[in-house]
Amino acid sequence: MIQKDHSPPETNTKYNCGIVLSGGGARGFAHVGVLKALNENGIYPEIISAVSAGSIVGVLYADGYTPDEIFQIFSKIDIYKILRFYRPAFGVLKAEGLEKTLLKYLRARKFEDLKFPLYISATNFTKANTVYFNSGALIPAVMASSAIPMILKPVLYQNDYFVDGGLMNNLPVEPLEGVCKHIIGVNVNPVSEVKQFSSFRNFADRVLHLAVRANVQQNIDKCTVYLEPPGLMEYHIFKVSSSEQIFKLGYEYTISIMDTIKESLH
């Protein structure tokens, strides 16, 4: 955890505390553990900025689900089951499983119907920039934010193609700057040391992860509190069978440093 000696610059701090949820595939279960630990200690984010896997957790949380309920949704219907069909030489797939899950469980259909504000970032592949959705239809925004390049098909929305928001910004702090007194940044997609590559796929994965890591680094200092639960590197972003262990990593890590978190947010 990185603790800053000061809060983000105050311009119009409408909210006391906001949270940023990164992408990370199945590691997104750690977000649920972090939220559970924070809530148990009286810390309730008032606004969320999220991307990719974080956007799925974020939209359910902003829709009024508790962390335990969010975990149960993941466990019962396996929101990431579409990733199990990934084959390196098979091309790209539609995220139909994710869409069906959102249609089944989301009570809100528009951003305006959520319990509190949510920003979802996606990469506009057509115009080569990052877009922050915060109004209109929810499901297309989540689908766009979660379209992992070279695995899931780009999402055509509002006449542009979109892919995973983490490609250009995997810690989207920007929507919360100036409106939050404190920002909690949670990154569940750390990069490990690699000494050799067994295949071209591993090499390509490494290139993508390093690019994503670079855009995270530039936003860390904008957070009052930055959380990166240790141990996540042991779990591949497609390892959905380890959801409970990943959840516990996020929860136990956050609990272990709760005193420091509270001091930072005081």
Image (spheres, grey):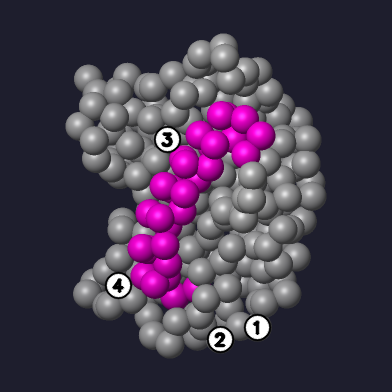
User: Where is 136 relative to 44, above or below?
Assistant: above
Q: CA distance from mark 4 to mark 2?
A: 19 Å
Q: Quadrant of residue 1?
A: bottom right
Near-viewer residue (21 or 25): 25
Q: CA distance from mark 1 to mark 3?
A: 34 Å
Q: Residue at x 63, y 25 (%)?
A: 83
User: Where is 150 relative to 141, above or below?
Assistant: above
> Residue lying furthest top in this view?
90
Span colored in magenta: 197-225
Q: CA distance from mark 1 to mark 2?
A: 6 Å
Work out whether mark 1 precedes mark 3 in sequence or the reverse, and give the earlier one: 3
CB under 8 Å between callouts 4 and 2? no
| Residue under label 2 | 263
| Residue under label 4 | 13
Report x, y in % for residue 185. 48, 63
Is residue 128 covered in magenta?
Answer: no
Circle 4: residue type: Thr
Circle 3: residue type: Asp
Report x, y in % for residue 61. 55, 48
